[in-house]
Image (spheres, rainbow, N blue to C red):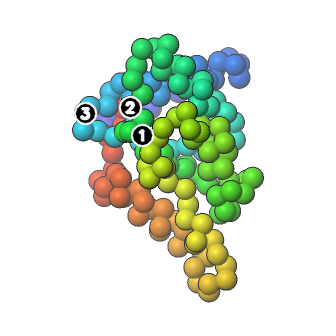
Amino acid sequence: MSTKAKLHIANSKAEVAPLLHAQVISCVQKCSDESKFVIALSGGSLPAFLSANALIQSFADAGVNPQWNKWYVFLADERCVKNDHPDSNYCSIQQHMLTAELPIPADQVFPIDDALLDDTTPGTCTTENIAKDYEDKLKSVLGDNGIRLHT
């Protein structure tokens, strides 16, 4: 199956969150009973656009069940820093999105493994080890064949 990418352009920063929410809601609506909603998030301004309260309100306004139990959250471009470090995308996502109001199961959110950043154990703190561990996490959810994209 071939899926064409769509480019959405917002005329202002104020229009980004509603466009993003609409896309997320559309994808969640396409989830069947046995499927998962997998999203990979980067840092920067994105976590603020997906703040828990705003996202919950957008789903309510659209009359759509967010099915939080089906969400699997990955990081698209995480830095090799501890998860509580201010430069960590996971830290930002946790502050803005992964709050108590948004009940995505904790075992369905995939930060990098802090233990692999421990440079006191020789040979563990390498980008190769961290990338391989993250690849294994992706495969544990997506399988070896990847996923079917909804746009």
Q: Is residue 56 visible?
A: yes
- The percent position of residue 75, horizontal first and vertical second, equals 54, 50
Q: CA distance from mark 3 to mark 2?
A: 10 Å
Q: Is residue 26 left or right of residue 16?
A: left
Tell how many labels.
3
Element class at badge 1: strand
Q: Which residue is mark 2?
A: 67
Q: Where residue 64 sits: x, y (%)?
A: 40, 19
> Which quadrant of the figure has residue 121?
bottom right
Q: Dot 1, crowdedness within 10 Å: few (<14), some or many (≥20)?
A: some
Inspect the image, locate mark 3, and give the three-letter code of the amino acid beneath it: Asp
Identify the residue at horizontal 64%, vertical 75% (top origin): 118
Q: Relative to 52, is 13 on the left or the right?
A: right
Q: Residue at x 31, y 58 (%)?
A: 144
Q: Amino acid at mark 1?
A: Trp
Mark 1 lies on residue:
71
Tell me the distance, in whole angstroms, between the alpha carbons under discs 1 and 2. Answer: 7 Å
Q: Secondary structure at mark 2?
A: loop
For mark 3, what is the residue? 33
In the picture, the quarter occupied by the N terminus is top left
Between discs 3 and 2, the one toward the N terminus: 3
Q: Quadrant of the C terminus?
A: top left
User: Who is closer to the viewer here, 112 or 151?
Assistant: 112
Query: Could you give the CA–CA distance between mark 3 and mark 1, rounded to whole angstroms?
Result: 13 Å
Q: Position of residue 132 (x, y in %)?
A: 47, 68
Residue 8 is drawn in which quadrant?
Answer: top right
User: Of the residues shown, which amino acid type is indicated by label 2?
Assistant: Gln
Q: Are marks 3 and 2 in contact (CB under 8 Å)?
A: no
